[in-house]
Image: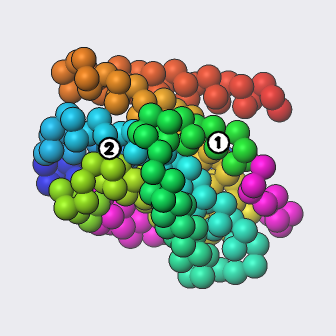
Amino acid sequence: MLLLKLLLVPALIWLISAAARKWGPGVAGALAGFPVITGSILLILTLEQGPDFARQAALASAMGAAANVVFGIAYSWAALRWRWPLCLPLGVAGYALAVVASQAAALPPWPAAMLGLAFLPLAGFLFPAPPATASALPREAGMAPRMAAGAVLVLIITSLSQKLGPSLSGLLAVFPVLASVLGVFTHASAGPAAAIRLLRGMVRGFYAFIAFCLALAGALDALRPASAFLLALSLAVLVQLAVMWLGRHRH
């Protein structure tokens, strides 16, 4: 289990960083929105805490997707004026306020998850336009630190889950690990325009993310965990392909 926590997420960060170099920050952002880290955390929670705990956490994660997107919006607006050391805490503050608001609303799990889905079409209009300055290519330097940062954040989240319970664990599972790690390194190495494109591109990936969470929450009631995760992942892949296809044809 420890090896899974230490190796899986850093490997995913490496793959998405490679995608940024090959296809640009927009495609990398869409891949980063895919449920790579949260799916890994929900799998660990299923193995450690049981399917019922993971089902409740998955529904909370679907709602938490909106909070993750709020991080990207806050970071992007800050990036128009400041460098990453100030943008990161402002983005985290936006995420925290969104989590507090979702907890204060006290909606039932399934309506709350649907609210997270309904926020996505609006979110794209809340990002600023990237600056007209050209973006540099993301550098390879810093790959080890960003992979280490991802592993540390996942260790912290999964270690706190038993004390927090399924609802807060699900919200914490959507802590913007990839958005913060990849956003900061993209901002530092390629400039604010590339960081904004990456964070805005993540909105497209969150359609697949929420599809994964909803399918997993429903499937864990009826299927064995392995089958439930396979079904949810298959649906997420189909949704991701559909969203990327629509994005290409829209332009």
Label 1 crowd (10 A; few <14 / some 14-19 / many >=20): some
Q: Is residue 76 inside the magenta stretch? A: no
Residue beneath the point at 53% across and 60% down:
101
Under mark 2, the amino acid is: Ala
Q: Is residue 235 above or below residue 165?
A: above
Q: Is residue 131 inside the magenta stretch? A: yes
Tell which of 21 and 235 is nearer to you: 235
Q: Where are the magenta residues, as a range?
A: 125-154
Residue that mark 1 sits on: 120
In the rendered image, residue 219, in percent from the top left (x then y), is placed at 31, 22
Q: Which mark is residue 57?
A: 2
Quadrant that contains the C terminus: top right
Tell which of 91 and 15 is nearer to you: 91
Q: Residue furthest right?
A: 132
Secondary element at image label 1: helix
Q: Quadrant of residue 150?
A: bottom left
In the rendered image, residue 135, in percent from the top left (x then y), is placed at 74, 63
Asked if residue 40 shows in the view, the reply is no
Residue beneath the point at 51% across and 21% down:
238
Residue beneath the point at 45% across and 21% down:
235
Q: Quadrant of residue 54?
A: top left
Under mark 1, the amino acid is: Leu
Q: Is residue 215 above or below residue 195?
A: above
